[in-house]
Image (cartoon, grey):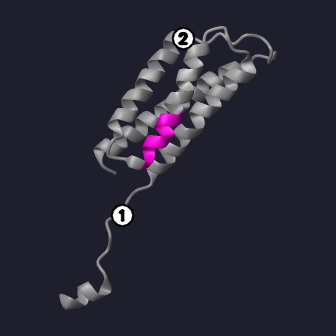
Amino acid sequence: MTSERSQLYYTCVFLQVSFQAIESSVMTRSDDSSRCWLDAQTLQMLLGELQRCRRSASPFKPVHAPLEEAIYHCGLLMAQCPGALDQRLCRHHLQAIGAPLGQAVRHLSVTHQPPTSSPRFRTWFGR
């Protein structure tokens, strides 16, 4: 794994875990109809990191769509937060951010092996 890919992978893992932690803190509350009061500064920081992550993902085309989706849902969450969402809808947005981040992490975790030479090519060299 190249250092650029590795850094992007760990950034995506950090973001996924961060949004999962926020989601689990929302889930600990018992009343789904009560307002969800998230820390808007934390969300703003995570959105900025998501956007930076998307910019640095330019060499990794398959990661673009999941990161764009996560940014979209984070933007929706930020537009309605704090206090305008009930906990159920807040969790929905957080899951909609976490799922594509999981896709990005899975894609980045796949190590690409260099193509092996064909047997015909090796016989040409006498191997």
Q: Is residue 36 above or below residue 100?
A: above
Residue 6: tell me if it is visible.
Answer: yes
- Residue at 36%, 43% in the rendered image: 6
45 lies above or below 61: above
Residue 103 locus on image (x, y percent):
53, 45
Is the residue under label 1 in contact with that under label 2 (CB below 8 Å)? no
* Label 2 Cα neighbours within 10 Å, binned few <14 / some 14-19 / many ≥20: some
Q: How many marks?
A: 2
**Quarter occupied by residue 79:** top right
Dividing the picture into quadrants, the one containing residue 23 is top right
- Majority SS type along the magenta span: helix
Where does label 2 land, which residue? 40
The location of residue 120, given as percent across then percent down, is 28, 88
Q: Which mark is residue 113?
A: 1
Q: Residue 123 at x, y = what percent?
A: 24, 90
Near mark 1 (Cα within 10 A), the count class, few <14, some 14-19 or many ≥20, is: few
Residue 94 on the magenta span: no
Write down the region rendered in magenta.
62-69
**Given the image, on which type of amino acid does mark 2 rest?**
Ala
User: Callout 1: helix, strand or loop?
Assistant: loop
Question: Could you tell me how far apart the alpha carbons at marks 2 and 1 are, in whole angstroms?
Answer: 42 Å
Mark 2, secondary structure of its residue: helix
Q: In the picture, which quadrant includes the C terminus?
A: bottom left
